Image (cartoon, rainbow, N blue to C red):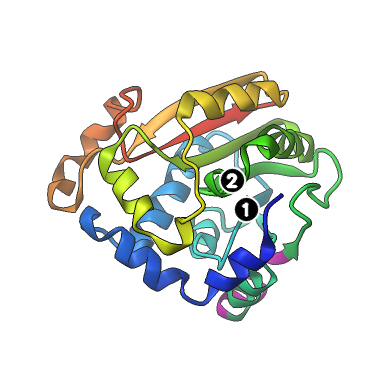
Amino acid sequence: MMDPAEFDRFADEYELQHAESIGLSGETREFFAQYKVSDVAQECMARQPQRILDFGAGIGSSIPHFKRLFPNAALTCLDVSERSLKIARNRHGDVAEYRSFDGNVVPYPSGHFDLAFASCVFHHIPAHQHVGLLHELRRVVADDARVFVFEHNPLNPLTRYAVSTCPFDQNAVLLTARTLRARALEAGFTHARIAYRLFFPGFLRALRPFERGLTRIPIGAQYYICAIP
């Protein structure tokens, strides 16, 4: 199972270590947090969620972006690391609910959320737990909800290098988009669509508007699956 002590140990140094690992990208930590939530907002333009679950929220990097792009939604930050949640709460206050869990069962009733989001969480979770936790995300969202799971793409060599040199990723096992999609379908989702992201580093950011036409090409630095119950 996930080890809360491991995440507690890195909570205080997360930002520094993350910043060092992404140096080659030419971007900031804030960029990586912001683009993910912006992608989710683009996907949800037709129907705004009222209750959002940030699964594996860590120290709350996504909180400001959720509150800016989904100002009327109630945000829940869930994590196995009490230390990480304490840091998130100290920084962002009562704009979200902060709740720890045992790494197995999401402590909310079925159909509670309109949207669930996981940002680079599953590569830290043992593979044998993936289907069970994806099933839990399937359980706690409404039938017309969406679940977004962002991950590092192991098919991208710069991504593999960044992960291999990052201390808090020392036990990480990257998974391909196809593997994650297959596990989502095994967990009971009826549909799971893959979108590859981040094709251009910072010095080529002027080309990023073209990325929307590249989401099926499996060389982006990251990807997400949009899973539908």
Query: In this orientation, which residue lies closer to the viewer: 24 or 85?
Result: 24
Q: Does 142 appear above or below 23?
A: above
Residue 167 in the image: x percent, y percent? 43, 63
Residue occupying the point 71% across, 40% down: 133
Residue 58 is drawn in which quadrant?
Answer: bottom right
Q: Which amino acid type corresponds to the residue marked 2 in the rendered image?
A: Phe
Q: Which residue is mark 1?
A: 54
Mark 1 surroundings within 10 Å by alpha-carbon count, few (fewer than 14), some (14 through 19), many (20 or more):
many
Instruction: Kindly state the secondary structure of the residue where label 2 is placed.
Output: strand
User: Is 123 left or right of 85, judged from the image as shown?
Assistant: left
Give the amino acid type for the residue marked by disc 1 in the picture: Asp
Q: What is the total number of numbered labels drawn onto the structure image?
A: 2
The magenta span reads 91-98
In the displayed structure, 137 sits above or below 165; it is above
Give above or below for 110 relative to 54: above
Q: Position of residue 121 (x, y in %)?
A: 56, 49
Judged left or right of residue 109, residue 21 is left
Residue identified by numbered label 2: 117
Q: For the C terminus, give its image quadrant.
A: top right
- Can residue 76 be seen by looking at this rendering? no
Depth check: give the residue in front, 161 or 56: 161
Q: Position of residue 164 (x, y in %)?
A: 36, 52
Q: Is 175 a magenta residue?
A: no
The x, y position of residue 218, in whole percent, is 33, 26
Q: Are marks 2 and 1 in contact (CB under 8 Å)?
A: yes
- The overriding secondary structure of the stretch rendered in magenta is helix
Sequence order check, earlier mark of 2 and 1: 1
Q: Residues within 10 Å of mark 2 (few under 14, many from 20)?
A: many
Residue furthest out toward the bottom: 90
Q: Give whichever of 191, 135 is nearer the camera.
A: 135
Q: What distance separates the C-alpha of mark 2 from that of mark 1?
A: 5 Å
Q: Residue at x 39, y 64 (%)?
A: 18
